[in-house]
Each structure stands twice: as structure tokens, then as C-alpha cells.
Image (cartoon, grey):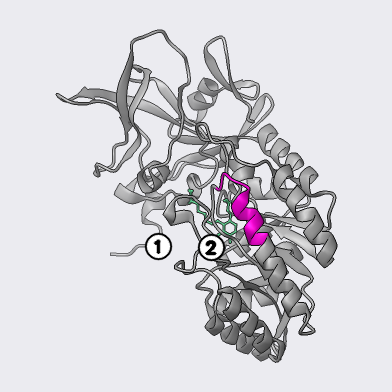
């Protein structure tokens, strides 16, 4: 569900023609719909309201301060994976005791920062990390609240780059190692065990893998409780898929239903880390057609956004719908929509059947709200695009377009 729709052949975000926003802000630009974000937050929170829970928005999906703040205002916390993300979450007003910190490569400085700020939980991913955290916490006369990230060896049937719950992946500890680490952590003076964590992947479109993961984690929590260790928080990660094309992912409610008996049985709080499902369909990337170009075998529309702005099609061969901002009559042809970057992998769509656009036409790359701007870069020395938030009939630039000066900030000759 989202609030991007046509009125009289013209694409609107909520109550504003997208064209109007572009007149002010230019292209490329990310446009987010506040109404859609609010709706997703309400639906998600509603799904979990029957149980003691905390939803921590995975801010890697979209770390714009306005977006984080909106979710914080809906009672959500933040799932972070770096010191920078902790900084952002705090700046956006997320209370520290609603921040969970995952990641296989936490540095000593990041640990100390998180401890100083008093975050809710470190989701520890290795034995060595646990040792370092223990020593950092002891040096600070603190106890670090810890969940061990368990890798349940479950195939999430998603793109291999975003599958994380298999034994061959770098994330977490397998069931037996995790068990041993819990026993070890129990004796550490700088560690307080407060939870168990898992996250099996992203853009998961079936309920089965989630169910299997929860069953396994539940079994391990029971086994650990038998050793006198209370697990107060069961963090089940994120990963709910969205519809990019014709997927039919489980709804938050379906997911939550599978967790109610578990939460009742174990008496622990359910933490989840939704990212994509909250923001994915709430944002689009709008770009302008610069040129049309034909070869003997291909037809190209060259646009002013590139893989530096939205890397998902290049990196994961992911599908994004592409909608004209003003619909026109015309020949439907198969074409590639490509960017200006000097790489053949710089494309948004390949052999896509669409009404042939004209130079200067605006195109909206749909479902770009998650892992869009956050994965953007300055490759080819391209300033990063602006971000706009629409609220009903109004809009606001929530991050200004970068300038050439921004490109060289911090550099010296
Ligand atoms: N929790 C942890 C520990 C994670 O690693 C992630 C995502 C999430 C939660 C949120 O997952 P979500 O609900 O958004 O699926 N760049 C890729 C996705 C990478 C996901 C990384 N981890 C993409 O564009 O598809």
C-alpha cells in the first residue's frame, strides 16, 4: 500500500503532483510519503500489540532523520549496526533504551560509545566480540546488556547477498556455539545476558523460514533457561518482504500471529527489527530522461540518476517498477533504462516493456524507500540526491542535494 497514484494521467504523491516537487527540487530526488510511512507504522504496531513487544526500525533501510523520528514518534526504537547509526538514532530522538546494536564488526570505540549512551542491547555475533565487549565494559565499570545472535541455519529463500541465517554466512553463532557462549558469558563480570537474537535474511516472502527460525530460537531459550539464565528479550530480527512486482509476502499480522504463543510460553518481550516493510513502498526515486539512444540490438533511455543513487538493480538484479510521472500515449517497446555512470552494470531496468518516453520526461523508480538513499554513493563524483518528505498537500526537503563543494569536504591537496 502506498500513496503514489495517478490523477488525470499525472502522478501524485499524496495530494501533490510529483511534477510540482521536481520544479522546486530538481532531479534525481527521493520522495517519501509521510502518510504511507504512518500507515505502515500503525499496521505494524497493530500486529504486535497483543504481546509485550518493541519494534526497532532497522535504520540501515532508510536513515533520514525525519524518517527515524516519525517511527520514534510511533513508539518504535532503532536497530543499528554502527556508531554512526547510533548517532543518527539519538539525533532523531530515539531513547537509548530502545536501541539494539547488531553487526559482526563492532569496534572498541563503537562499543564504548554505545555503553556510554546506555543502549538496550548488544547483539553479539562472535566469541571474540563477546570477550572484547566484556573488557570494554569492565574498564568503564559497566555491564553490557547482551543478546547472542544465533544463526539457526535456515534457508530464507532470498537473494544470496541478503540471506544471513545459513551456517555458511558470517552472521551470528550456530545453535551449539551460541549455547556454549551463553554459559561463558554468564561468568563474565562485564556482561549481563538480557536476550537472544536472530535475523535470517531480508526480502523474505514466505512465512515458513520465520516459523522455523522462531521454533529453533525458542528451543534454545528453553535450554538456556534450564541453566539458570533468564532471557528477557527475544529479538527475532527483520526481513519481511514487500511487493516489488508480484510477490505475496506474509503480512506483519501473519508474522505476529506465529509469535503470540511463543511470547506467552516464554514470557519474554518480543523485539523485532523491521526495515524494508516500513519504508520500501513509501518512497520513489524520480529521475529525468536525458537522451534516447538505439543500437542495432537495444533501445536505451539514459536518465540522470545512476547506480550511485540506487544500486539495488545493479547489485541484486532487483526489479523496480518504473512509472512515468506524466502518462502519455505512445508505442510500447522493450527498452533498457540506464544511468550516466561509466559501467555497463548501471541500469534500473533491462528489456522492460514500457511506453517510449521522450527526452525531459520524468520517470519514478518505484519502491525505492528502502536501501535506496542509504546505499547511495558519490561514485563518478556525483553529488548525492535530495530527499523530500510529502505530507498531504505540502512537502519539505529533508535532506538537501549535495553540492560540488560537499564532494571534496575534508580533502586536502
Ligand atoms: N536486522 C538485522 C540484523 C539486519 O541485518 C537487517 C537487514 C534488518 C534487521 C532489516 O531487514 P529488513 O526488514 O529490511 O529486511 N541492501 C539489501 C538489504 C540488506 C539487508 C541487511 N540487513 C537490499 O537492498 O535488498
- Describe the element under mark 2 as helix, strand or loop: loop
Image mark for residue 410: 1
In this rendering, which labeled residue sits more in front, label 2 or label 1?
A: 2
Any part of residue 257 in sight: yes
Q: Which residue is mark 2?
A: 165
Is residue 206 within the magenta segment? yes
Image height of 142 relative to 149, above or below: below
Q: Position of residue 10 (x, y in %)?
A: 53, 15
User: Image height check: is 318 above or below 153?
Assistant: above
Separation of marks 2 and 1 at Cα, in angstroms: 39 Å
**Element at label 1:** loop
Residue drawn at (61%, 58%) of the image: 88
Question: What range is drawn magenta here?
Answer: 204-214
Residue 89 visible in the shown view? no
Specify whether tag 2 is near ligand 1 (CB below 8 Å). no
The quarter of the displayed image where residue 111 is located:
bottom right
Task: From the top left corner, tell me how far across and down residue 133 is, in percent.
Answer: 61, 83
Left or right of 262: which side holds 154? left
Amino acid at each position: 500500500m502506498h500513496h503514489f497514484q495517478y490523477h488525470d494521467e499525472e502522478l501524485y504523491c499524496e495530494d501533490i503532483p510529483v511534477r510540482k516537487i521536481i520544479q522546486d527540487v530538481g532531479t534525481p530526488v527521493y520522495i517519501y510519503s509521510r502518510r504511507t510511512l504512518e500507515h505502515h507504522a500503525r499496521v505494524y504496531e497493530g500486529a504486535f500489540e497483543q504481546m509485550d513487544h518493541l519494534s526497532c526500525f532497522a535504520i540501515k533501510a532508510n536513515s533520514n532523520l525525519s524518517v527515524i523520528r516519525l517511527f520514534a514518534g510511533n513508539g518504535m526504537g532503532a536497530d543499528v549496526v554502527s556508531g554512526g547509526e547510533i548517532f543518527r538514532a539519538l539525533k532523531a530522538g530515539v531513547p537509548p533504551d530502545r536501541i539494539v546494536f547488531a553487526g559482526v564488526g563492532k569496534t572498541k570505540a563503537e562499543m564504548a560509545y554505545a555503553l556510554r549512551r546506555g543502549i538496550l542491547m548488544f547483539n553479539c555475533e562472535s566469541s571474540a566480540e563477546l570477550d572484547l565487549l566484556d573488557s570494554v565494559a569492565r574498564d568503564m565499570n559497566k555491564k553490557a546488556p547482551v543478546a547472542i545472535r544465533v544463526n539457526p541455519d535456515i534457508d530464507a529463500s532470498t537473494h544470496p547477498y541478503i540471506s544471513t541465517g545459513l551456517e555458511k554466512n558470517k552472521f551470528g553463532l550456530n545453535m551449539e556455539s551460541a549455547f556454549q557462549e551463553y554459559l561463558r558469558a554468564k561468568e563474565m563480570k562485564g556482561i549481563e545476558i538480557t536476550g537472544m537474537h536472530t535475523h535470517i535474511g531480508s526480502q523474505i516472502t514466505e512465512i515458513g523460514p520465520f516459523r522455523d527460525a522462531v521454533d529453533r530460537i525458542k528451543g534454545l531459550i528453553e535450554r538456556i533457561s534450564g541453566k539458570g539464565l533468564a532471557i528477557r528479550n527475544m529479538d527475532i530480527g527483520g526481513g519481511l518482504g514487500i511487493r516489488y512486482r508480484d510477490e505475496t509476502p506474509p503480512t506483519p499480522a501473519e508474522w505476529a500471529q506465529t509469535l503470540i504463543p511463543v511470547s506467552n510460553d516464554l514470557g519474554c518481550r518480543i523485539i523485532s527489527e523491521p526495515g524494508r516493510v516500513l519504508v520500501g513502498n513509501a518512497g520513489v526515486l524520480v529521475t529525468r530522461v536525458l537522451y534516447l539512444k538505439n543500437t542495432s540490438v537495444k533501445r536505451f533511455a539514459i536518465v540522470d540518476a545512476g547506480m550511485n543513487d540506487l544500486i539495488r538493480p545493479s547489485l541484486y538484479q532487483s526489479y523496480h517498477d518504473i512509472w512515468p510521472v506524466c502518462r502519455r500515449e505512445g508505442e510500447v517497446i522493450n527498452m533498457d533504462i540506464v544511468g550516466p555512470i561509466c559501467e555497463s552494470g548501471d541500469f534500473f531496468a533491462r528489456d522492460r516493456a514500457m511506453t517510449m518516453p521522450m527526452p525531459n520526461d520524468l520517470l519514478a523508480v518505484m519502491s525505492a524507500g528502502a536501501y535506496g538513499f542509504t546505499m547511495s554513493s558519490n561514485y563518478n563524483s556525483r553529488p548525492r540526491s535530495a530527499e523530500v518528505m510529502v505530507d498531504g498537500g505540502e512537502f519539505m526537503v529533508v535532506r538537501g542535494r549535495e553540492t560540488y563543494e560537499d564532494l571534496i569536504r575534508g580533502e586536502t591537496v
